[in-house]
Amino acid sequence: MDTKKENETVEEAKVNPAKASIEYDDFMKMDIRTGTILEAEKVPKTKKLIRLKIDTGIDQRTVVSGIAEYYNAEDIIGKKVSVSLIFPPENCVASNRRA
């Protein structure tokens, strides 16, 4: 395997970014925390939604996520997740979300 040739090929490939770049100041406005899932339950009458209670170390938040097709609620309790806290609280059919 010729790694040098492979690297040159990758460098030559032009890939369009999925999204526009942001400035550093915009990135610094984000509040991303790591939290631990304390509670998780499937939202009744939905196929995709799980209601999560997440401890960020500063506070506890309820978040509704569309991951029920991929994860069982019981299996993700105690797992670490990243939470973006830049969005204002919204009322949702499934829960009063605060993240």
Image (cartoon, rainbow, N blue to C red):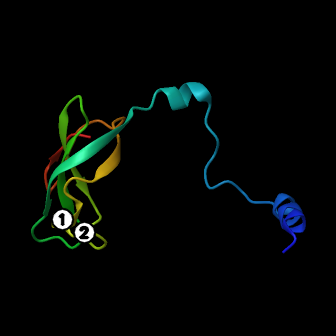
Judged left or right of residue 28, residue 80 is left
Q: From this viewpoint, which residue is outermost toward the front?
A: 1
Judged left or right of residue 73, residue 32 is right
Q: Residue at position x 26%, y 36% from top?
A: 56
Query: What residue type is disc 1 on?
Result: Ala
**Real-space CA distance between mark 1 and mark 2, rounded to the nearest whole angstrom:** 7 Å
* Above or below: residue 45 compared with residue 28: below
Q: Dividing the image into 4 quarters, which one contains the C terminus?
A: top left
Q: Secondary structure at mark 2?
A: loop
Q: Residue at position x 33%, y 36% from top?
A: 85
Q: Nearer the viewer, residue 11 or 6?
A: 6
Q: Dividing the image into 4 quarters, which one contains the N terminus?
A: bottom right
Are the residues tagged 1 and 2 within 8 Å (C-beta)?
yes
Query: What residue type is disc 2 on?
Result: Ala
Disc nearest the viewer among 1 and 2: 1
Q: Residues within 10 Å of mark 1 (few under 14, many from 20)?
A: some
Q: Residue at position x 33%, y 49% from top?
A: 81
Q: Nearer the viewer, residue 28 or 6?
A: 6
User: Looking at the picture, how far across and down is residue 15, in whole percent?
Assistant: 75, 60
* Above or below: residue 29 compared with residue 22: above
Which label sits on residue 68?
2
Which label sits on residue 73?
1
Judged left or right of residue 80, residue 62 is left
Q: Secondary structure at mark 1?
A: helix
User: Looking at the picture, how far across and down is residue 40, in whole percent?
Assistant: 15, 57
Q: Work out whether mark 1 precedes mark 2 in sequence or the reverse, and give the earlier one.
A: 2
User: Looking at the picture, how far across and down is residue 87, in whole percent?
Assistant: 33, 38
Q: Nearer the viewer, residue 23 or 58?
A: 58
Tell me which corner region of the image, top left, top right, bottom left or bottom right, holds residue 13.
Answer: bottom right
